[in-house]
Amino acid sequence: MSSKGTSKFKAQRFSAIVLIPLVMWFLFSLLSRVGAPYLDMKNWLAHPLNAIPMALLIIVGAFHMRIGMSEIIEDYIHSGLRPVLLLLNWVFAIGVVLVAAGSVITLAFT
Amino acid sequence: MTTDISSQNKDRSQISSSGKPPILSPHLQVWKFTVTMASSITHRACGAALYAGTAILAIWLYATANNPGLYNLISDFLGSPLGILLLAGYVWALYFHLFKGILHLVWDSGRAFEFEVAKRLSFMIFLGATLMMLVTVLVGLSIAGIL
Ligand code: HEM
C-alpha cells in the first residue's frame, strides 16, 4: 500500500544496487577498449559475457535515470512545461532501451 | 563599516523583548559552503551528465552493431584531445555518482549520518573519484597506445 513517492524511491534504490556491479564492470572492461579497431570491438561485444552486462547496464540505467530525471523535473519545473518534459523523459528512456536492445540482438544474430 | 554591524546588533537586542537578539531565519549571508552540500549538488549534476552519457552509449552500441563508418567516426573523436577530456569527465561523473550513490544507500540504512563522518566521507568521495578517474584514463590511454 505504499504511495507513488515511496515506490519510486524503492525502485530507484533497487536499480542503484543492481547498477553497482554493472557500472564497475563497465568502467574496468569497456573503457579500456575505447578506440579498438571496429571488428575487434564488434567481436568482443558479440560475446554473451559482454553483450549481456552491456544490455543490462543500459536497460537498468535507463530505468534508474528516468526516475531520477523525473525527480529533477518535479523539483525545478513548476510551469505547464512539466508534463511535456516528463513525457519527453519517458520517450527518451524508451528510445535508449530500444536502440541498445536492438543493437545487442543484432550482434547476437549476425 | 564595523561600527555598522555592531550598531545593527544593538538595534536587534533593543527590538527583542527578552533582551537577547531575536532569532532570524536563515539567509544567504549566514550560509556556509560545506563539502557535504557540494557533494549533494554534484551527485545530481553527475546523474544528469550520465543521463546524456547513456544516450551516447546507446548510439555507440548501435554503431558497433550496424555501422562501421559511424563507429570509426566516434572512435576518432574519442581519441582527439576534446574527446579524451569528455571521456575523462564522463568517467569522473560515473565514479562520483557511484561512490556517492553507495553513501546514499548507507544513509538509507541509518548509518554514517554524523556530521563529521558525513563531511569526511564526502571529501573522500571527491578525492576517490578524482584518483580513480586518473588511474582509469591513464590505463585506458596506455592500452590505446596514445600514452
Ligand atoms: C548508468 C548509470 C547511472 C545513471 C545514468 C544515473 C542517473 C541518475 C539520475 C539522473 C539521478 C537523479 C539525480 C538526483 O535526483 O539527484 C540519480 C540519482 C541517484 N542515483 Fe544514479 N545513475 C546511474 C548509476 C548509479 C549507480 C551505480 C548508483 C549506485 C549506488 C546510483 C545511485 C543513485 C541514487 C542513490 C540516487 C538518488 C539520489 C537522491 O535521492 O538524491 N546511480 N541517478
Image: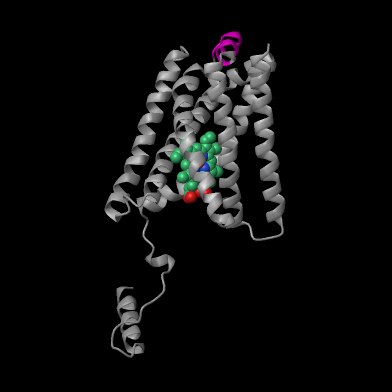
Position of the N terminus of chain B by quadrant = bottom left
Between A39 and B2, the one nearer to me in the picture: A39
Position of the C terminus of chain B by quadrant = top left
**Residue B79 rendering spot, x and y as whole percentages:** 54, 19
* Magenta part of the chain: A36-45
Residue lying farthest to the front in this orientation? A1
| Image-based side of B26 in relation to B6, left or right | right
**Does residue B45 appear in this view?**
no
Count the labels in the image. Answer: 0
| Image-based side of A45 in relation to B137, left or right | right
Question: Quarter-wise, where is residue B55 in the image?
Answer: top right
Residue lying farthest to the bottom in this orientation? B17
Between B73 and A24, the one nearer to me in the picture: A24
Residue in the picture at 65% in, 38% down: A93
**Does residue B65 appear in this view?**
yes
**Residue B31 rendering spot, x and y as whole percentages:** 39, 63
Indicate yes or no whether the magenta region holds residue A38.
yes
Between B33 and A17, the one nearer to me in the picture: A17
Question: Quarter-wise, where is residue A88 in the image?
Answer: top right
Q: Is residue B57 positioned above or below A9 on the image? A: above
Residue in the picture at 37% in, 46% down: B106
**Residue B137 rendering spot, x and y as whole percentages:** 43, 24
Between B3 and A19, the one nearer to me in the picture: A19
Colour mode of the rendering = one colour
| Image-based side of A28 in relation to A98, left or right | left
Residue in the picture at 36% in, 50% down: B35
Indicate yes or no whether the magenta region holds residue B17.
no
Q: Is residue B47 positioned above or below B74 on the image? A: below
Examine the residues drawn in magenta and state their main secondary structure.
Answer: helix
**Residue B138 rendering spot, x and y as whole percentages:** 40, 21
